[in-house]
Image: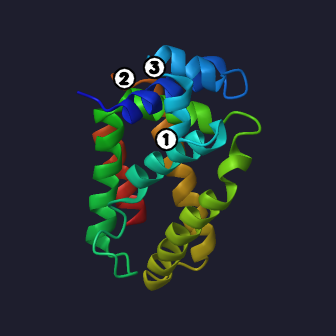
Amino acid sequence: MKSKKEKIVDTAIKLFAEQGFHNTSISKVAEVAGVSKGLMYNYFESKDELFKHIFDLGAEKLTENFDPNRDGVLTKEELIYYLHDIFYKMQKDREYWILFFTVVMQPGIREIVLDRTHEIIAHMMEELTAYFTEKGCEEPEAQTRYFISVMDGVGMHYLLDPEGFPIKKVVQKIIKEFV
């Protein structure tokens, strides 16, 4: 059984995605989640704080198996593991990822988590750039941006058409090209 906090978070993700962040009030989240507005404020001091929490949950899922031993060095094996892991997570919890990306892309929302986004992206980009440098890429920063763009595109297309998208074959192509 889900805790009250988990129910609030799940409800907020759904409402933010369906109605937009700015059109969803804390009162509406509380009502749909079946909790009092006061209880909402026990967990989250504002709607922005609730969104930051939702973003952090997604960021944790996105990064938890990137450089899993946390030694600051991304190896070939770790990158392959990460590629399989992240798309497995999207497959396993497709609805969450669709809702999460829908909410993050709404105008005015990104600013709420901009600092956190830069922190997460900077860490991943730093390790990826070092990885591509070690591989001997002429332009490792450009290769890093290209890799991230490919991952974003594949993730979005997979989420839009999970039955028709050949995710296993595409992951193998990514591995062949980047690893």
Tell me the CA gap for discs 1 and 3.
13 Å
Instruction: Answer whether residue 27 is visible to the viewer in this image.
Output: yes
Q: N-terminal of the two: label 2 or label 3?
A: 3
Question: Identity of the amino acid at label 3?
Answer: Ala
Report crowding for label 3: few under 14, some 14 to 19, many 20 or more residues within 10 A (C-alpha): some
Q: Please name the amino acid that badge 2 sits on.
A: Gly
Amino acid type of the residue that numbered disc 1 sits on in the rendered structure:
Tyr
**Residue in view at x 35 percent, y 70 percent:** 67
Numbered disc 3: secondary structure: helix
Residue 10 tag number: none
Query: Residue 176's image quarter?
Result: bottom left
Does 140 appear above or below 1?
below
Instruction: Give the foreground label among 2 and 3.
Output: 3
Q: Nearer the viewer, residue 75 or 59?
A: 59
Q: Secondary structure at mark 2?
A: loop
Q: Nearer the viewer, residue 149 or 29?
A: 29
User: How far separated are the C-alphas under marks 1 and 2?
Assistant: 40 Å
- Which image quarter holds the N terminus? top left
Left or right of 119, for residue 7: left
* Residue 169 placement: quadrant: top left
The nearer-to-camera label among 1 and 2 is 1
- Earlier residue among tags 1 and 3: 3
Q: Quadrant of the C terminus?
A: bottom left
Q: Position of residue 96 (x, y in %)?
A: 42, 32
Q: CA distance from mark 2 to mark 3?
A: 34 Å
Residue indicated by mark 2: 164
Q: What residue do we see at 31% from left, 72% from top? A: 76
Q: Which residue is mark 1?
A: 43
Q: Which residue is mark 3?
A: 33
